Amino acid sequence: MRILGLVGATHDSGIAILDDGQIEVVIEEERLKREKHTHSFPILALSAALGADGRGFSDIDVLVTPWDVARLRRSFARAVLGRLPGSLSFLAESTHSPQRNEIAILNFYLQRRLRRHFPDVTMPPLVNVGHHESHAAAFFVSPFESAAVLVMDGYGDDAATSVFSGEGHRLRRQWQSSFFNSLGMVYTFVTGYLGFQPVADEGKVMALAALGDDRFVEPFKDCVHLLADGRYAINMAYFSFDTYGEWRPFKSRFLEAFGPPRAPGAPLDERHKALAFALQRVTEVTITHIVREVVRVQNVKKLVFSGGVALNCVANARILETTDVDEIWVPPSASDTGVPLGACLWHHHQTVGAKRTFELTKADYGLAYSDAEVDCAIAAAGLTAEVLDDTALYSRIARDIAGGGIIGWFQGRFEMGPRALGFRSILADPRKPEIREMINSKIKHREAFRPFAPAILRERAAEFFEIDQADPFMTLAPAVRPEKAHLIPAAIHCDGTARIQTVAQNSNPAFHALLKAFEAQTGIPVLLNTSFNRQEPIVASPADAISCFLRTKMDGVVLGSRYITRAMQTLTTLPQ
């Protein structure tokens, strides 16, 4: 069975194809459209996977979407009718985005758009899968035969938090919170309150939290009440998103407790940092409160965590530190970037009943580009490249990075999810404290308080970090071992943690070989790894990578076996 998963009416639109339980491709539309968190219908992703004329649809047996439309309509109706008259604001155009209107008629929207773009194609049958079910289905490609499964996001089609039990090729929902009882919504709206972009910049708030003091922790605890059964309740005395949505998410009580909101771009002061700290601390406490009871009731020590909240790598590390969970697995596309794949997995295993045959150990399921396409992009840019064999390439790049170079690294297919995992990365030397500011000033131009991530050989991870499990998808932020901190100062956040990526030889042989080459030259099995972009989606194609190189002050870029440095170019237009 070949299943196509598609979402095209919310942020992070994209597609996935599952072929007899094996992942064939996962493509987020933003990578090809070059627009972050695009709401656009994923026509570029569909065309790349199935042909511009849609001829590949003939091999698709079923089309699945990660929203249960009937369930969503019922939830929406209850939300409006149960909160009259204030909830009538949901119907106002000023508080209700067109994208959400399209969710409400999702099947019609998808079918109409598909017919428009592929008028001569007979479409496969369409099946709706629940949103949290699509998140929970990450269990089916996890390393666990049985596990507790926790899903937390802003909202699904009927819940904001769901708990499942996973066993073999079956998932069973154990409980769920109500639609508006959402820790994810609180985090997102406070992100906006702090002057950042909701549903995009929550990671910035997580990083900012490390700079704050605890003045607001006790007051913020009143915003989220912990219940005796491992559940929680948002205190709606502080919030009004259940009646006014995005237009007015906070009541006056919140403003009285925490002060006025920060305007976007305004200076960050100690109050803002303290509010970020309180939000993060209460989020961690709430998540670990849930997890303790979940693993006690289910009598398991393995946890799969998915949904947008699962991208909070600091909270994930806290789960390992403070609960009975001995191993946690978070998919690389835990947010809505992963639900097209999750819908495929749910249909294949839960609906059809197929046994599990596949474990997700790597993230490179995007598009690949041939050497000829790389050469064409290099020539189109008027650049000169060296072609090196593997041994020479890894040794040369390791030497240049050790010498202070900042290098773009482009290999194979691009990653799924929001993290650069050694296929579309910018790499630097973690031994040099000044390298972080150099990356920011030369390339990224992002907030100085945001950390960069260390990638480390899997076999050396426990030596440098307080962690006993693999983390190939950069989903945990453990503490750096004090005796190793002086060796990798650029990779450490101000709170002594690091969002790590463990690199195994069998999942990313090229990146593993580069780390080994750097280790051979420096004794350090770690590279600083940040996403290959500049305030844009992570690069997808060779042309994207070269464009980013030319628009920044990277010292070099590797595309497969091709190595381009500034020193070998004669162009006067290269940034100096």
Image (spheres, helix red, strand yellow):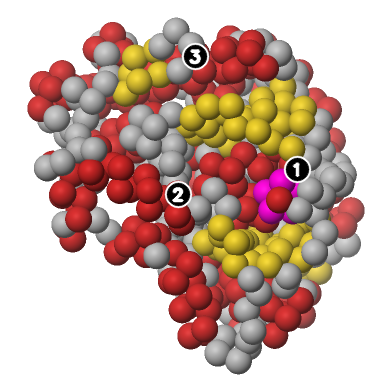
Q: Name the residue under label 2.
A: 71
Q: Name the residue under label 3.
A: 230
Q: Can residue 576 be seen in this view?
A: no
Whole-percent x, y for residue 95 in the image: 20, 53
Q: Kindly identify the amino acid type of the residue bearing the numbered disc 2.
A: Arg
> Helix or strand or loop: what does disc 3 sit on?
loop
Measured Cα–Cα span from mark 1 to mark 3: 27 Å
Q: What segment is highlighted magenta in the picture? A: 345-350
| Mark 3 or mark 2: whose residue is earlier in sequence | 2
Is residue 349 part of the magenta span, yes or no?
Answer: yes
Q: Is residue 275 visible?
A: yes
Confirm or deny contact between disc 1 and disc 3 (CB under 8 A): no
Observer-nearest of 282 and 400: 282
Measured Cα–Cα span from mark 2 to mark 1: 26 Å
Observer-nearest of 256 and 353: 353
Q: Kindly identify the amino acid type of the residue bearing the numbered disc 1.
A: Val
Q: Main secondary structure of the magenta part?
A: helix
**Lateral position of residue 177 relative to residue 213, left or right:** right
> Helix or strand or loop: what does disc 1 sit on?
helix
Closer to the eye: label 1 or 3: 3
Confirm or deny contact between disc 2 and disc 1 (CB under 8 A): no
Whole-percent x, y for residue 66 in the image: 55, 54
> Helix or strand or loop: what does disc 2 sit on?
helix
Q: Residue 141 carries which label?
A: 1
Circle 3 residues within 10 Å: few <14, some 14–19, many ≥20: some
Q: Residue furthest bottom?
A: 120
| Mark 1 or mark 3: whose residue is earlier in sequence | 1
| Mark 2 or mark 1: whose residue is earlier in sequence | 2
Closer to the eye: label 2 or 1: 2
Whole-percent x, y for residue 426 in the image: 60, 50
Position of the N terminus, as image quadrant, is bottom right
Observer-nearest of 383 and 456: 456
